[in-house]
Amino acid sequence: MAKFCASGQGRGRQTRVLLVDDHPLVRQALRDLFMREADLVVCGEADDQQGALAAVADSKPDLAIVDLRLRDSDGLDLIKDIHHRHPETRTLVLSMYDESVYAEQAVRAGARGYISKREATTKLIGAVRRVLDGDIYLSEAVAPPVGPNGAAPSWPQGHDTV
């Protein structure tokens, strides 16, 4: 897969984003979306686990946006690998699969958020920024119930919803 660095219009520190999806059209649309953000730069892309791990090691992204279904592998396994090998790289799942089924699995694997491909691009950019700020991004539809002390008992600490 070709390596490139597509940046938005702007100066200052740019956040490096890796795109991991098995559909070239989706990667292109995401690249185009991030080109409009002055502080986000696409530093690479991959369509499978092996390519993604090589790209993370090579380009050292701040964030990897990962689909759950990849060309020859499972996105959850990739998230676990990134989390263990490159803990400084945050991951955000962008998938067509049902958030109510997969979001908790993704967060437990090490992802910092989960957003559906059905969401508007403004929601995706908001999710990216929340994850980069150190929060966990999940929609209110799958957020765990808040306990009496304000904690979310079944999710990792730091969980926030939109």
Image (cartoon, rainbow, N blue to C red):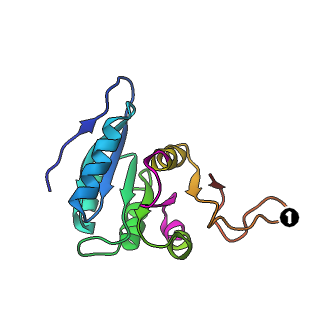
Residue found 52% across the figure and 73% down from its top: 105
Q: Amino acid at mark 1?
A: Pro
Q: Position of residue 9 (x, y in %)?
A: 31, 27
Q: Which quadrant: the N terminus?
A: bottom left
> On the image, numbered disc 1 is attached to which residue?
148
Can residue 138 be seen here? The reply is: yes
> Which residue: 41% across, 68% down?
96
**Residue drawn where x is 44% and y is 61% of the image:** 118
Residue 29 in percent (x, y) is at 29, 50
Looking at the image, residue 130 sits to the left or right of residue 149; the answer is: left
Which of these two is toward me, 119 or 3?
119
Find residue 93 and report its image quarter. bottom left
In this rendering, the answer to whether 31 lies above or below 56 is above
Q: Is residue 60 visible?
A: no
Q: Residue furthest top?
A: 11
Q: Can residue 107 be found in the magenta stretch?
A: yes
Of residues 161 and 152, the one nearer the viewer is 161
Which stretch did the figure color magenta? 106-122
Give the structural element (helix, strand or loop) at label 1: loop
In the visual, does 4 lie left or right of 138? Answer: left
Query: Are there few (<14), some (14-19), or many (20+) residues within 10 Å of tag 1?
Result: few
At which x and y percent is residue 24? Answer: 21, 59
Which image quadrant for residue 84? bottom left
Residue found farthest to the right: 148
